Amino acid sequence: MSRLLRSPSVLRQTIPRVSTSAYSSASASASTSASLCLPASFTTLRRAFSCYSARNTFAPRPPTPRCYSTASPSISYGPTDAPALLSQTIPEHFASIVAQFPDNPAVIARAPVASSALTAVEGRRQASLPPITTLMPPRETVYTYGDLDRVSDLLAHGLQSRLGVRKGDRVAISLGNGAEFAALSYALFKLGAVLVPLNPAFTGTQVAAALHHLGVKVLIIGAVTDLPYKPGRGRSNLPILSELVDGEENLSKPAGERIQSSQVPTLEAIVLLDNTADHMAVAGSHDFADTPTQKTKSALTPFLYLTDGIEVLRDDQIAALRDDPPPPVRPDETLLASDTVNIQFTSGTTSQPKAAMLSHTSILNNGYFIGRRMGLTPEDKVVCPPPLFHCFGSVLGYMATATSGSAILFSSPAFDPAASLQMAAEHRASGLYGVSTMYIAMLEWLEQLNHQHQSQLQHTLSAGTNEVKQKMAELPTHLRTGIAAGSSVPESLMRRLFSTLGLQDLVICYGMTETAPVSCMTAPNDPLEKRTTTVGRVMPHTGVKIVDPNDWSRVVPRGEPGELAASGYLLMQGYWGDAAQTDAVMTQGEDGRTWMHSGDEARMDEDGYVAVTGRIKDLIIRGGENIHPLEIENCLFQHPLVAEVSVVGVPDARHGEAVSAFIVPHAGVAVDGGMSVGSEGEIPQEEAPEIRDGQEVQEVQVLTADSVQAWVKERLSPHLVPRHVFWTSGYPKTASGKIQKFKLRDTAKQVLATK
């Protein structure tokens, strides 16, 4: 590792105070664009999320003055005076929150029960019905801050005394969103162990590679992995574990005794969280019943072994801990705020994931500043569908809520649009998080529910209890705020979220795993135009700059595109075991500060607002002209028949690269022309209208490749018109919901090679 990254003084440097000026108020044009049209009528459920009250109509609010440098070069530093940078470890700060709000709800988590899936949705665009789940409530766990403190103490003692977990040990967690994940995270933080969250969808090969790379000591994993968009459905993890526990010497061994794994020599224990009761179909499958799998189970440590048999999701046993709490946790070594406490795998949009090392200081303060800019309070309840194995779910999620005394709500272990909206309604949540694809799925669910399946809704309501029906009929909207992040958020989608879901204070966060993660963010009181077209301004105690991608020493002028870089407390401590990759992205500038280069193209305006225009590697160069895919994507996203779009460049003999658009049409829309691709089944080139009782029910709308090209040609320059149009049912994505465009390019090249 380089001298720069070995030096603690460089990584923990404070940001120098700079000359400042208060930024200007909102422009008149921004305030006049705030008038939004609301739908005329919704179903009972949709009314729970609609904006019919005066509080939800846009009125321009004066920005709160804050200090930012606005020199001509594209460089800006956030405030360094207030709020102050927290110097505590995560457990120290958490203890202060517990002392202030012991009885406030901290975590409310739901898990599907075996009968909760009315329609098992194989893919939201493949289904003939919207993804409706029953309104009968699934199993729900509620932790107050005091409960979360006690349960995490209990788990920490089990990990320490029974499995020998010490400060610095890497402990991997492969679970869906739930109360257990939150409690385990704080247990590890209290011990000074390093939390390694894994994507539950990882294959056996990916799990083994991740564990081996990081030298993981303990793996905690669910027996079943829940699948997005498939409530109550799942995948057995036992075949994966049978690959890790591959020796006869591991069979019939006492719980807690060290296992042997040829693939991961450092692995000493696999703790199995038995969630099969929520997935009876999986529990009865061959994966669970065959002899090798049963032998594998005998080598695993039951989750209850950590808690001495206490079931931490049962209300009576949670209550019992209040009367007889565990003793305080004592780590084997003193914890420091600079210690690595979390290793996050990067998304891998353009390459293989890397393991970024994050400290107490970086993730604690990042969550704290996010909550402050959002305006979170102890009265807020935030529904968080993004996964906890990603920075969005963990830092923007439970770290932002926990530092604010707010409650975080997990509607399902894996994303389910219906469950997310139902939980927001039933708990009168004030916040709702999501990446673009999640928000689109929720909006589509409401639209289908409202326009196409009134009878199914009425049937569902009539099948529920009077209590449930009364709740759904009487609920007003309480949604106010939220975060859209993870990928670009089209302006038209932002406006739909304002008007349809009532998210008037919705903010956009920009960042990357290596910056823990957020470096730029909008604020609820920013001008509307800035909130919908930029990722906001730099965060406190942070610096951002836009540099020439071919010469990182040159900061470009305001308004000129370049590569975005960030500096400050939030930087990772490096990639685990990869000094070369670390040195390739982290450099020391002429100002003496360490800068993390993002690979994202961005512009900074005179007020310090940053607009991200795409990945530099995604830039299309056609005939010597640089084309930004986001400009074409935003144009096509406004087409009434287009649900989602992603634009890439493919090799072209004449122009170097040709613009290619991968389009997901709205449900029920037929397509014509172009080329169909996708692993979830090809979209039909023709579709007959629905006939019921001899009458045509609905005329099928057709989206053609020619109409797509004409739409762009009418609105943008001719060289931006897609030459190739591909129809698809979905995109290859990272765990955080970012589209892996390099895979789309590969697909396009393969398809075009056969033409």
Image (cartoon, helix red, strand yellow):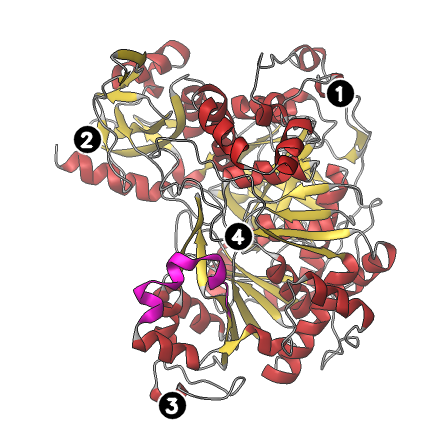
Amino acid residing under circle 1: Arg
Give me the C-alpha separation between circle 4 and circle 1: 33 Å
Query: Where is 363 relative to 702, above or below?
Result: below
The amino acid on which the numbered mark 3 sits, given as a three-letter code, is: Glu
User: Secondary structure of the magenta portion, mostly?
Assistant: helix
State left or right for residue 13 relative to residue 689.
Answer: right
Residue 540: name its quadrant: top right
Tell me the distance, in whole angstroms, between the alpha carbons under discs 2 and 1.
Answer: 56 Å
Q: Pick whichever, 213 or 129, lies toward us.
A: 129
Residue hosting label 4: 413
> Measured from the top left, where is residue 642 in percent x and y?
38, 22
* Residue 507 horizontal/vertical position (percent): 65, 33
Question: Quick one: SS at disc 1?
Answer: helix
Residues rendered magenta in the picture = 273-289
Residue at 52% x, 56% y: name it.
176
Where residue 508 appears, as percent x and y from the top left, is: 62, 35
What residue sits right under mark 2 in the picture? 653
Mark 3 lies on residue: 249
- Pointer 4 or 1: first along the chain: 1
- In space, the residues marked 4 and 3 are separated at their CA atoms by 34 Å
Based on the picture, tell me whether residue 280 belongs to the magenta stretch: yes
Do residues under tags 2 and 4 come within 8 Å of each other at their CB atoms? no
- Name the N-terminal-most of marks 1 and 3: 1
Residue visible at 46% across and 88% down in the picture? 253
Q: Is residue 454 magenta?
A: no
Quadrant housing residue 204: bottom left
Amino acid type, callout 4: Pro
